[in-house]
Amino acid sequence: MSVSDSLILMITFGSFLLTLIGLVIEIVKNVKK
């Protein structure tokens, strides 16, 4: 694996995590209503 490959992998995984966390926060907001 080259450096650029691992960088792309990290960025992809990071954005996926952010999306997942955002979804969880939205769900929690809806449940608390």
Image (spheres, rainbow, N blue to C red):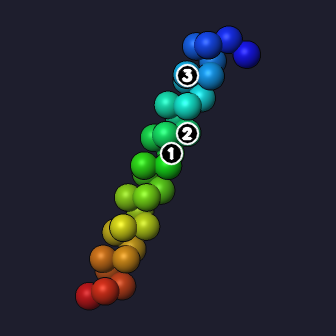
Q: Is residue 11 left or right of residue 32?
A: right
* For the residues bearing labels 1 and 3, Cβ distance under 8 angstroms: no
How much space separates mark 1 and mark 3, taking CA atoms?
14 Å
Residue drawn at x 36%, y 85% as measured from the top left: 31
- Decide: is 1 above or below 14: above
Residue 25 at x, y = what percent? 36, 67
Q: Residue under circle 1?
A: 16
Q: Amino acid at mark 2?
A: Phe
Q: Is residue 28 left or right of residue 3?
A: left
- Decide: is 6 above or below 23: above
Q: Which mark is residue 5?
A: none
Residue drawn at x 30%, y 77% as measured from the top left: 29
Q: Residue under circle 2?
A: 13
Which residue appears farthest toward the right when viewing the image? 1
- Decide: is 24 above or below 6: below
Q: Secondary structure at mark 2?
A: helix
Q: Secondary structure at mark 3?
A: helix
